[in-house]
Structure formats: structure tokens, C-alpha cells
Image (cartoon, rainbow, N blue to C red):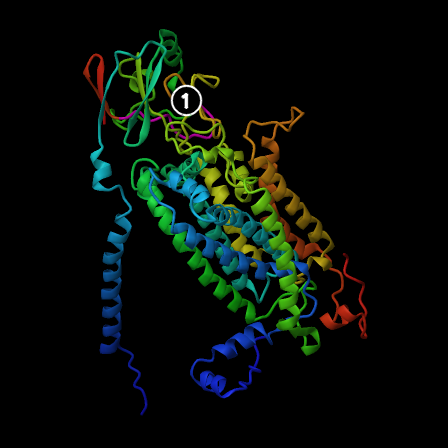
Amino acid sequence: MATTTAAEPTRRDFIHIATAAAGGVGALALAWPLIDQMNPSASVLALSSVEFDLAPVQEGQQVTVMWRGKPVFVRHRTPKEIAEARAVPVASLPDPLARNLNLPESAQATDQDRATKPEWLILIGICTHLGCIPLNNQGDFGGYLCPCHGSQYDTAGRIRRGPAPENLAVPPYAFLSPTRIKIG
Amino acid sequence: MAGHSTYVPKTGFTRWLDARLPILRFANDTMTTFPTPRNLNFWYSFGGILTFMLGIQIVTGIVLAMHYVPSADKAFDSVESIMRDVNYGWLLRYMHSNGASFFFLAVYLHIFRGLYYGSYKAPREILWIIGVLIYVLMIATAFLGYTLPWGQMSFWAATVITNLFSSIDQILPHAGTAITEWLWGGFAVGDPTLNRFFSLHYLLPFVIAGLVVLHIWALHVPGNNNPLGIDVKGPQDTVPFHPYYTAKDLFYLLLFVILYAVVVFYLPNALVEPDNYVPANPLVTPPEIVPEWYLLPFYAMLRSIPQKLIGVIVLFGALITLVFVPWLDTSRVRSMRFRPLAKQFFWALVVDCVLLGYLGAHRPDAVFPGTSIPMLPFARLGTAYYYAYFWLVLPLLGLIETPKPLPATIATSVTGTGVEQVNAPAE
């Protein structure tokens, strides 16, 4: 028996396409739960904020607070450090954006936009290169030096030299009172 | 050389089995009578050694998993408990951790063997690409395994490597961060990360085993390349795989295992960063984070580039480059024995990779010991040469190099008889 060759799409072609389409959609629908299960779980997301008392932190001192499994630097800056940070023109910075999660994304990396209350610099203490913890008061800019790949940050946590692409991020935070903040 | 089967079942049972599941026929054709070039040298023994090491890693890994606890609180302690409390736990763990190093030692010699004798060229391109896939999966598996003891190096290696994906932020804002958080299952490397890494570390060796089957299958279609790089012309050029190469492979396997045993029993921590005996601490980065020795050349490439995204592209590009080697090499001569220029560039590549490995163990701002010569320019030069070898030297040399005359057949070259007596290979 000879096979028939039809120029027009046959009912069999339609069945093939419909089966493949239904199977493909089904496979995608099944793949999503398998992919999404790796995202942060509800219990991880629930650890959203911490409160911290600033009173014991002396001028020139830095304290590290854990927030969402990340170290947050709370730095009580000296007037000299503030002055140094303010003296830098924003146009000369490798990353001109504030990277401050309390401000719009387009905010410029002025010292005012990095530390709303100038004496309190609050940063996520994770190098924006590959995630190491930068060392305090090291490097050529008086701020931070990442020991892994040599990125250097200034006293406003802005990247000045090295492979890191962005300024150290400023986490969302709010002053509950003049000496108490809530991070997250 | 995949030819007719020569298997003849001898007993009633094997005839009965052969008609139902010809597994003995398959074993006979692939492991016994398989015609193999008669001139394979020492460098061809690493395929067998690698298969053996994969077996060692899977067997020791399965038993280690019976005692290991993949939790951020308990992982470090459970590894110490394996070392101290579990019967022979110290031996199994040292076999496994050093086994990874010897696995990589063998795979590097195997890869350079392939590069030297042109084993990647037609008709063996697929064989080569499957090999590259196996190598990439080995790197992934080794990295995942390195994180499991949850020491300082484990934790920070996991942090640095997963953060490589955050560089995607520079092309697609927020996409890189979303991917890293998806990899972590949190906002930093932590308990969910360790759990999934353990799951994948257990899975990938079996994927590798599957690819090894494909690798050997793809080998058995064209047959082995050989140090002369010329095709097998007839039965006079080959010997049966068994007993000739089973015996030869076994001899070199034993030498290799002796070396492995020396390290396992006498130098078990020689290749380990001491920092990994400090429990993971997310608040303190060790003074220096370095990967295991077998990844240092790639780390040197990453650290030599001052821009994050480009550094990551250079790192992964170095691996992806290997896929294209069969088409980048334009020479029709396979073996470097007959390529006087290419041979010199090849050895320069070997030196380059060793140099990059040395530089990768040092900070980018380091100087050579006892001098004030900075290392960074050498790391950049080394990276440039690695790429140049594959993307410039191999394509151009094939066009300009005059290869030495090739021997007519393997048999004439090996026995030194026959009409076409050629100048002896250059080593």
C-alpha cells in the first residue's frame, strides 16, 4: 500500500503539532516548581529586619550586625572621615550611583546620599566584586580594603580602585530614635 | 575500527545469553578483541586511570555520605567525626579529598596528551567535546565537594564562585543578583546552599559516568588516535586491546596508585589550605582565598582582569575555548611529532599553564619572592598566551607550517622495516 503524500497539512500533522505543543507547555509548567524551589524559602524571607542600639558605638568605631545572613557595617564616622568623603567630586568616582536602597536608583553617590546622617555610615559589608568581607580602615582611601582581589573603598564605602563594579550597598534602614536604628 | 564482531559463544549458557542479551559479545568486542594501534605509549594510559579514579571517588563518596550531615550547624563537626570516630573514616576521607587531586592530575595529562597528538581532530571531534563536558562537570563537582566540609575556605569559595554570576548585573540589572539568590536559597551562602550543593555533588559523578560511556563509545567508532597521528591502515597496525593494553594500562595504573597512596598516607593535607580546618564564619574572610591547585590557572586569569564582568567572561571563555579546538587547528597533520613549530608553541602552553597556576596562588598585587617584580603583568601575559594559542597560533600555524613527512603506516614506523623508511620521530 502506497503512502499518500498530501501537500496540505493533514490531520496527522495537526495531531503531531498539538501533541508537541501540549507536551511542551506541560513540561514548562512542571519545570517551574523545580526551579522556583531553589529561591529563598518563606522562613528565610521572614528574617527581614533587625533593630540595633547605636549608643555604645564610639566615634571612629565600627560594629558589625547580621541582617539576612549578611554582615552590615555600622560605622560611627569621625569629622575627618566625613570631610574626606565630601571632598571627592562625584564625577571622579568609578560608580557614580548612591546604591542606597532608601533612595531612588538614580541617586548620585554624594556623601549625603550615602549617609543620610553623616556620622552614621551603614553599609552591607560585602564586597561588590565577589562577595568577600572588606577589612575596615585599610587601603589607600581610609575606608575598606577587600582582601580577596584588592578592591578599595573610601570612607563613604564607595569603590575607588580595583575590580569591584559598585559602591558598597546601603541597606534599607530607618532611625527609630536618635540612637536606635532598624535595618530592613 | 568498529568492525564485525569476532565473538563466538563457547558454552550452551553463553549461546543462550547471546541470543537474549549480547552483553558478553559487547564486552568482548570493546574490551578484549578491540583492535588498538600497536604504538600507544605511556600517555595513553590515563583513560583507564581516570575511569579507575572515578570509581574510587564514587565508592568513597557514597560511604562518606553515610556519615556526613549537610547542615551549616553540623557539617564541620560531622567531617571531624568522620576523621576521628568512624572506623577508617580518616582513610576514606583522605582517599576522597586527595582522590580529587589525582583525578585532576590524570585529566590534565590526558588533555595535554590529546592536544599534543592532535586527538581532537576529525573524526574525533565529538569524542573531544564530550571530554570537555566531562572536564567541566569535574570542575563543578570538585567545587561543590570542596564546600561540603564547611570550613572557612569552603564557605568563601562558595561565596566567591556563586558571586561570579552576580556579574550578570552589569548586562541585565538585577538579573545576576536574582540568580545568585536563587543559587543560594537565601541572601547569602548558608544552610540551604549547603544542602543543595550536597545533593548536586552526589548527582554529578553519575552524570560524568554516563558521559564516560558516551566518551568511550565515541572513541570506539574511529578507534584510538596514536602518537604518530596517522590512521590505522590495516591489521598489521593494530594489536588486540587484551592482553596488550590491559597489561600496559594496569602497569601504569599501579604506578599512579603508588603515588596516590604516598600522598594519602604520608602527605594527606599537603594539598589542603589550613584555613579549611577553621569552621565557616560569614563575618570574617580569610586573608586570602585560593581554590584547590587544579583550578589555580583559571583563578589567575580571573584575578588578572581588573573589571568584574570581563574577568568572569575570560574565566569561562578559557573553558569554552576548548570546545572549538577541533576547528581552530587548521593543520592536516595530527601529531606534533611532525609539526616542528606547533610543538614549540605547545610546550610554551604547558609552561604557561603551570606559570598561571603559580600566579593564581598569589594575590594580584604580589611580587616574585626575593625581587620587586610584580606578578600581575605576567598573569595578564599568561592569560593572553592561553587565548592566543587556541585562537591565533593553532589557526595560523596550520597554514604556514611545513610538517615533516609522515610515515606510511604505523607498522613500518614501529618495526623500522618496509619500503618507506622515514626519519625517526623527533623524540
Name which residue lies at 52% across and 74% down.
Answer: B27
Label 1 sits on what residue type? Leu
In terms of depth relative to the viewer, which is nearer, B294 or A106?
B294
Viewer can see residue B61: yes
Which quadrant of the figure has residue B157? top left
Instruction: Determine which residue is flagged by label 1.
Output: A93
Extreme residue toward the top, this view: A79
Q: Can you say whether B51 is above or below B22 in the image? A: above
- Numbered disc 1: secondary structure: loop
Chain on which label 1 sits: A
Instruction: Pinpoint residue B84: horizontal percent, then vertical percent.
Output: 45, 41
Instruction: Pinpoint residue B283: horizontal percent, then vertical percent.
Output: 37, 27
What is the quadrant of the C terminus of chain B in the image?
A: bottom right
Residue A115 located within the stretch drawn in magenta: no
Name which residue lies at 33% across and 18% down.
Answer: A63
Residue A165 located within the stretch drawn in magenta: yes
Extreme residue toward the bottom, this view: A1
Neighbourhood count class around disc 1 (C-alpha, 10 Å): few under 14, some 14–19, many 20 upward = some
Say whether residue B209 is left or right of residue B224: left
Say whether residue B401 is left or right of residue B376: right
Name which residue lies at 27% across and 67% down.
Answer: A20
Which quadrant of the figure has residue B284? top left
Examine the residues drawn in magenta and state their main secondary structure.
loop
Q: Can you say whether B117 is above or below B193 in the image? A: below
Name which residue lies at 35% across and 45% down.
Answer: B69
Say whether residue A9 is left or right of residue B148: left
Instruction: Report the span colored magenta.
Output: A159-171
